[in-house]
Amino acid sequence: MSATFRLFRFAPLLLLLAGLVAFAGPKLKKTTITKNLTIGVPTDFAALPDDGIAAKYPAQRRPLAVFSSPNGRVGMSVAQNPTTFSNRDYALLLKIYKASIQNMYGKVQFLQEDIRTVNKRDFVLLEFVSTVADTRRTGTLAPIRKYQLVQYAIEGDQLYVFTFDAPAQEQAQWQPVARDIMSSVVMK
């Protein structure tokens, strides 16, 4: 009876420990994207090869790197595009990109919109849940909802875009990971 009592006395602590381990996000490994750019990538994410990037992003300017979770439902990318804006234009860029995101999706719930400093560099940050409805005349598909965290930075005449996306129903699991990833960006 005494051993059973001791087991029940420690059961809440064991449950708490198991819960913390279960909710601990994946570890990040420092990954070099370019000579002057590194980002933390979850250790179980895989880099898409060039032909995989070309298939997923059939645009002329493909991302510099794309990483995907083992099941392919969660992804992150780093893109670089020319820009005429400078890093003094971040307040304007925040408004422009927020409006662009609102026009791109049927419904957007912004969780965070800010200009923040990460590793001594300013970034425009937009965190949101987007919903796209099936607008075909015979549309019977359920709306697609995604959790996304997008971060922008300008270096010289280049705009860098860091994007993380996951299914909205998995937001609680991936939001801390996405925030850690965005906080790990180092641009020299």
Image (tube, rainbow, N blue to C red):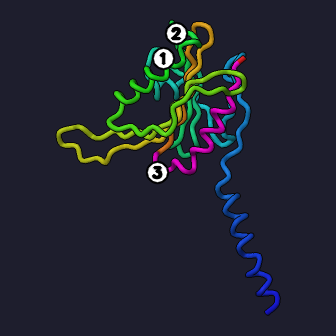
Question: Quarter-wise, where is residue 118 in the image?
Answer: top right
Q: Which residues are magenta?
A: 168-187
Left of 119 or right of it: where is 48? left
Q: Residue at x 41, y 28 (%)?
A: 101
| Between discs 2 and 3, the one toward the N terminus | 2
Q: Mark 1, residues whose alpha carbon is within 10 Å: few (<14), some, or many (≥20)?
A: few
- Disc 2 vs disc 3: Cβ atoms closer than 8 Å? no
Magenta stretch prevailing secondary structure: helix
Mark 2–mark 3 distance (CA, rounded to whole Å): 35 Å
Q: Which residue is mark 1?
A: 92
Q: Secondary structure at mark 1?
A: helix
Coordinates of residue 75 in the picture (x, y in percent): 54, 37
Q: Quadrant of residue 88?
A: top right
Instruction: Answer whether residue 181 is magenta in the image.
Output: yes
Residue closest to the eye, 180 or 48? 180
Q: Is residue 27 magenta-colored?
A: no
The disc placed on residue 85 is: 2
**Mark 2 vs mark 1, CA separation in Å:** 9 Å
Q: Measuring 73% from the left and 32% from the top, which residue is drawn there?
A: 30
Task: Tell which circle, 2 or 1, labels the residue nearer the N-terminal end.
Answer: 2
The residue carrying pointer 3 sits among few (fewer than 14), some (14 to 19) or many (20 or more) residues within 10 Å by Cα, namely few
